[in-house]
Image (cartoon, rainbow, N blue to C red):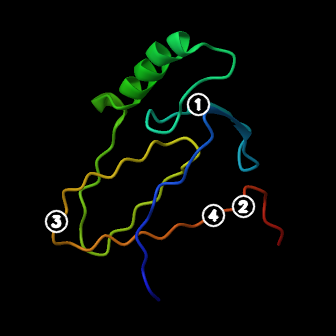
Amino acid sequence: MPRTVARPRRRPASARRRDDTRSASDRKIMGIEIDQAHVLAFKGMTREENQPLIRYLTERIAQSEFTFRVTWEKDMVALWDNRLVHHHAVNDYHGALRVMDRITVNDRELEA
């Protein structure tokens, strides 16, 4: 199967609120999906109000206390939930093959 290079998707010019209830648990999960390169503004706020908030949030999620770095080993696989995890790949694997496959898991409970 041929491999393709991943390209970033264009996102709407506003942050999307995540307010998901997962069927596998009774927890309520809330978050804001934000990326300074793609989020231009929050609805209902002026540009002057938006810029400090967007800058604060993007700097906050990049702090080392909120990061996890994978130390790759042969045949290793990493999975994460893109709904509430900010993924940032560091280009420090020169000469190594990076293979990415995306899967989507339906959030409803499976029937037997």
- Identify which amino acid the numbered label 1 is placed on: Ile
Label 1: element kind: strand
**Residue in the image at 53% along x and 66% along y:** 102
Q: Is 53 above or below relative to 64?
A: above
**Residue in the image at 28% along x and 31% along y:** 64
Tags 4 and 3 touching, CB below 8 Å: no
Residue that numbered label 1 is attached to: 32
Residue that numbered label 2 is attached to: 106
Nearer-N-terminus badge (4/1): 1
Location of residue 100 in the rendering, given as x and y in whole percent from the top left corner: 42, 69
Tags 4 and 1 touching, CB below 8 Å: no
Q: Nearer the viewer, mark 2 or mark 3?
A: 3
Q: Which mark is residue 104?
A: 4
Label 3: element kind: loop
Q: CA distance from mark 2 to mark 4?
A: 6 Å
Q: Which residue, as the protein is rendered here, is positioned at the far front?
A: 47
Residue that numbered label 3 is attached to: 94
- Mark 4 residue crowding within 10 angstroms, few (<14) / some (14–19) / many (20+): few
Q: CA distance from mark 2 to mark 3?
A: 35 Å
Q: CA distance from mark 1 to mark 3?
A: 33 Å
- Indicate left or right for 71 with 43 as reference: left
- Indicate left or right for 68 with 81 as reference: left
Q: Which residue, as the protein is rendered here, is positioned at the far left?
A: 95
- Identify which amino acid the numbered label 2 is placed on: Asn
